[in-house]
Image: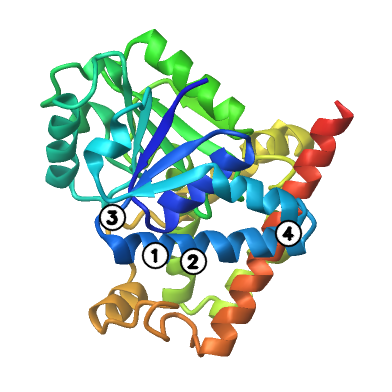
Amino acid sequence: MEKLSILGAGTMGHSIALSAAWAGQAVMVYGINDQDLENADKGLADKLGVMADNELFDEQEAQKIRTRIRFTTSIEQAVKEATFILEVVPEVLELKKKLYKQLENLVEPSVVIASNTSGFKPSLLAADMEHPNRFIVAHFWNPGHLIPLVEVVNGEHTDQQTTDRTMALLHAMKKKPILLNKELPGFIGNRLQYALFREAQALLDAGAASKEDIDAAVTYSIGRRLPVTGPLMTADMGGLDVFSAISNYLFEDLANDQRSGETLSKLAEAQKLGDKTGEGFYSWEPEVSKAINQQREKTLIQFLKNDLAQEGNE
């Protein structure tokens, strides 16, 4: 079993650590200071409490999971015994490259160094590394402890052993890793997500419908099917002759904007950034934010329960 170290104790860092610890793995988590670690510890406690309340495990198991996670503000201590390092620091290219250089001076060439980046190509991130063969992207989706998908992306020099070890670790964490055959900006999930988001923006800007109805068109139709069948399987089920015919007349009318839409650009410029500022496309009063976040978390937990039940029946 790999000895996992996670560099970054923020929302994604401690969520991924929780996912690994739930699967029985010991994890070391590095944070930049004591406040960072205090916030992570509180985040862990909150998440474990919600998961126990929703009967994913009991309180006793929650305590066992927590004991498998250790914190440190020393990067040297964090990676001292590591065989697999996952970097979860802000999406700043030079910051990441500087960290990799530091790590290569601290660990043996056999240690895998992975990034949780959501968009940088691995070859770009590993460009200055002495041993780029041991570098790979493992992109977890937020919230990391509830979303099964992890996108695994090889760089130009990533070797097969690094890929195999990464996939094995993720399977041991009970994740659903997918392997990209080539480097692409945004990988797979974000490309699909933002294609939908671009069309939603275009519909809103064109006045085709209200924001509420545009969102409802997803949550009450394709959103209900997507947890079971992705877009390609859905097309098979609907008939490829039908989907081909619709594609032929509809594609030319779909949005092909190269930049953010007018409404989104104005909101971003006005610092109306959504939930984190209290206003965006929607108004986010504290009670509204709490209710919607709880509802989404509860739904994701139910999906996770379904996954676990299905695996138990296989």
Q: Is there a contact, CB below 8 Å, between mark 1 and mark 2?
A: yes
SS assignment at label 1:
helix
Q: Which mark is residue 187?
A: none
**Of the two numbered discs 3 and 2 in the rendering, the one whose residue sits closer to the viewer:** 2
What residue did someone put label 2 on?
A: 42
SS assignment at label 2:
helix
Q: CA distance from mark 3 to mark 2?
A: 41 Å
Q: Residues within 10 Å of mark 2 (few under 14, many from 20)?
A: few
SS assignment at label 3:
loop
Q: Which mark is residue 38?
A: 1
Residue at the spot 25% in from the left edge and 50% down from the top edge: 91
**Of the two numbered discs 4 and 1 in the rendering, the one whose residue sits closer to the viewer:** 1
- In the foreground, 205 or 244: 205
What residue did someone put label 3 on?
A: 258
Callout 3, which amino acid?
Answer: Gln
Callout 1, which amino acid?
Answer: Glu
Residue at the spot 33% in from the left edge and 58% down from the top edge: 257
- In the foreground, 57 or 64: 64
Figure quadrant of residue 223: bottom right
